[in-house]
Amino acid sequence: MTTLTIILIILGIIILYIILAYNKLVRLKMRIDNAWSQIDVQLKRRYNLIPNLVKTVKGYVKHERKTFENVTKARSEMLNAKTIPKKAQAENMMSSALKSIFAIAENYPDLKANENFKMLQEELAGTESKIAYARQFYNDNVMALNTSIQTFPTKIIASLFNFKEREFFKAQGKEREVVQVDFE
């Protein structure tokens, strides 16, 4: 083997590694975009179910105005959020507001027995589970991309092709607390 052959083999291996690393980073980026789209789909579903839930509950619980205002505000925040961190914050706000509605429902046996409320509650519970799974899937893929971007030698390829780390979807402040419902 000549020196030229050895150099060409080494160069070929380096080029192959660059291609494989680049493709891995692109796949991870696409998974994150897909995961966020899945979260968006579930948030839209929940967003569409909320007016029906509020309407059903309002008929039974006329004096819980503040809770309904919080749900309306959270729904509006979700509609206006444009960035992933803002959408995450609005989603957390909505989760908190929905917990308040379900906590209120516990004190109204007629409401809990209402078929429409039961159906909406089941659909929202299923949607909440899907959102939680989609958030976990999103965060797992963010972790994989961020790890790849931070580890050597992929870090070099990531910086050459301008791959950036992504933010995790996380609960903040009040969203981490247990919802307290006060009937006084």
Image (cartoon, grey):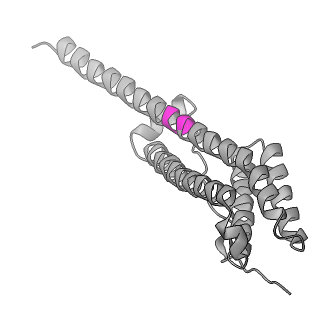
* Residue furthest to the left: 1
* Residue furthest to the bottom: 184
Task: Determine the main secondary structure of the stretch shown in magenta.
Answer: helix
Q: Position of residue 146 (x, y in %)?
A: 50, 47
Q: Is 27 left or right of 61, judged from the image as shown?
A: left
Q: Is 3 left or right of 57, judged from the image as shown?
A: left
Q: What stretch is highlighted in magenta?
A: 30-34
> Residue at 73% across / 80% down in the picture?
180
Q: Is 104 left or right of 118, judged from the image as shown?
A: right
Q: How many labels does the image show?
A: 0
Please state which of residues 152 and 169 is positioned toward the viewer in this rendering.
169
| Quarter holding residue 81 | top right
Q: In the displayed structure, would residue 19 be above or below residue 107?
A: above
Please state which of residues 73 and 19 is positioned toward the viewer in this rendering.
73
Is 32 within the magenta?
yes
Q: In the displayed structure, would residue 79 be above or below residue 91?
A: above
> Residue at 51% across / 32% down in the picture?
30
Is 50 within the magenta?
no
Note whether residue 168 is visible: no
> Residue at 71% across / 66% down in the picture?
96
Q: Where is residue 27 in the image (x, y as percent from the top left)?
A: 44, 31
Q: Where is residue 133 in the image (x, y as percent from the top left)?
A: 49, 52
> Residue at 86% across / 87% down in the picture?
184
| Quarter holding residue 70 | bottom right
Q: In the displayed structure, would residue 175 be above or below residue 20?
A: below
Q: Position of residue 88 (x, y in %)?
A: 68, 53
Rendered-image quadrant of the N terminus: top left
Note whether residue 38 is visible: yes
